[in-house]
Amino acid sequence: AQRVTQPEKLLSVFKGAPVELKCNYSYSGSPELFWYVQYSRQRLQLLLRHISRESIKGFTADLNKGETSFHLKKPFAQEEDSAMYYCALRNDYKLSFGAGTTVTVRA
Amino acid sequence: GAGVSQSPSNKVTEKGKDVELRCDPISGHTALYWYRQSLGQGLEFLIYFQGNSAPDKSGLPSDRFSAERTGGSVSTLTIQRTQQEDSAVYLCASSLGPSRNTIYFGEGSWLTVV
């Protein structure tokens, strides 16, 4: 069975500080992993997918198959990064989500 | 349309009443999903449609929940005899196909059962 774990429910950082959101997964096959973000009063939207290997809004995430992790990182957090972040794993058609991490960036 | 559209955006209903939630996916998207977002439960998968067929209904919590899709487009999620534990945000999502395509979400229908 597939499972996505986000151990931190809440994360608070100061503006300009680095931020890292942890995500671990369990999956028997070759995973397809994503980070979705939900800003206040907005819809859930795709932030990153591991196969793209790109940086979006300064965020990066590297798939580590040995540690079964897909942590999300940004070197310098901004106030507009305050949001709910979900790590997700896709098996064929279905997305399975972690519980989410609420990030608050303080001035 | 430009994105996945859901209605109503907010619904307050009395316990025991039936509710219908509607989803208009992005035009041309054959795959459609319903998820439920609630405090303490995160994002739960409910059902997946490919075209008008639902090959995976495994996430529907009980037989009070049902969904259909017509014309390969609009989908309706129906909750019969609503209970307070049904209170949640119901999210619809769609994608071009079942795999390797980005899944786009609607803004959700916030259901409150009183």
Image: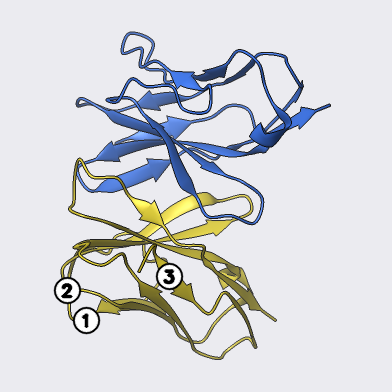
Quadrant of the image for the N terminus of chain A? top left
Looking at the image, is A95 positioned above or below residue B16? Answer: above
Quadrant of the image for the C terminus of chain A? top right
Amino acid type, mark 2:
Asn
Amino acid type, mark 1:
Thr
Q: Secondary structure at mark 3?
A: strand
Q: Give the percent coordinates (x, y) of residue B37.
A: 53, 57
User: Exactly how many numbered labels are in the figure?
Assistant: 3
Q: Give the percent coordinates (x, y) of residue B101.
A: 23, 45
For residue B22, what is the image quadrant?
Answer: bottom left
Q: Depth-wise, is mark 3 or mark 1 nearer the camera? A: 3
Question: Mark 1 and 2 residues: CB-CB less than 8 Å, in contact?
Answer: yes
Of callouts 1 and 2, the N-terminal one: 2
- Tell me the subunit letter for badge 3: B
In the image, which lettered chain appears blue?
A
Of callouts 2 and 3, the N-terminal one: 3
Q: Give the percent coordinates (x, y) of residue A97.
A: 43, 41
Identify the colour of chain B in the image: yellow
Alpha carbon distance from label 3 to label 1 = 16 Å
Q: Give the percent coordinates (x, y) of residue A100.
A: 56, 38
Alpha carbon distance from label 1 to label 2 = 6 Å
Instruction: State the residue in front, B12 or B96.
Output: B96
The residue wearing badge 1 is B70
Looking at the image, is A87 positioned above or below residue B106? Answer: above
